[in-house]
Image (cartoon, helix red, strand yellow):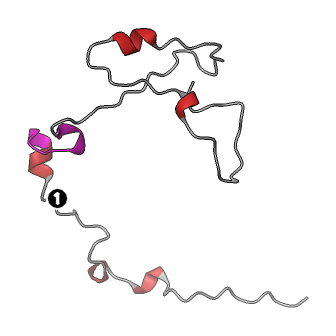
Amino acid sequence: MDKAPEPTSSAAPLGEYTPRDFKVVGTRPLRPDGIDKVTGRAQYGADLSAPGMLVGKMLRSPHAHARIKSLDVSAALAMPGVKAVMTAADLPEPRDLEARDVSEHIMA
């Protein structure tokens, strides 16, 4: 029976490397924002605001895989500060040809 060819690789075997060959692997990364993060001084996108900026919230069903038969958004629209309520009826139809599981909707 013929002997199988030895696998070839363009990478050098690990045995030829020494710890001095690595500049990043096995080292602690510098974190210039580390102190700000652990002290709470760091600013994130969620911390910023602008004049007239709107904030969106998503209400999810408390029941997994439940089928929503009807949706009344009038109470949400009547709340102070609410500018709009968006449901799946407000979304455009999918225009791409990507396969979808139509039994699970992304919004009610």
Q: Quadrant of residue 58?
A: top left
Category of crowding for the residue at label 1, using alpha-carbon neighbours closer than 10 angstroms: few (below 14), some (14–19), many (at least 20): few
Residue nearest the observer in this picture, 39 or 108 = 108
For the point 23% across and 36% down, which residue is it? 53
Say whether residue 7 is magenta. no
For the point 26% across and 77% down, which residue is it? 23
Which image quarter is the N terminus in?
bottom right
Q: Is residue 27 rendered to the left or right of residue 69?
A: left
Q: Position of residue 57 (x, y in %)?
A: 37, 27
Q: Position of residue 21 (x, y in %)?
A: 30, 83
Spot the residue most to the right: 1
Q: Which residue in the protein does label 1 denote?
A: 31
Circle count: 1
Which image quarter is the C terminus in?
top right
Q: Quadrant of residue 19?
A: bottom left
Q: Which residues are magenta?
A: 38-49
Q: Position of residue 82 (x, y in %)?
A: 32, 20
Name the amino acid type tagged 1: Arg
Say whether residue 47 is magenta. yes
Vertical placement of 8 versus 52: above or below? below
> Callout 1: helix, strand or loop?
loop
Residue nearest the observer in this picture, 79 or 6 = 79
For the point 53% across and 32% down, which residue is it? 90
Vertical placement of 22 versus 100: above or below? below
Q: Position of residue 14 (x, y in %)?
A: 46, 80
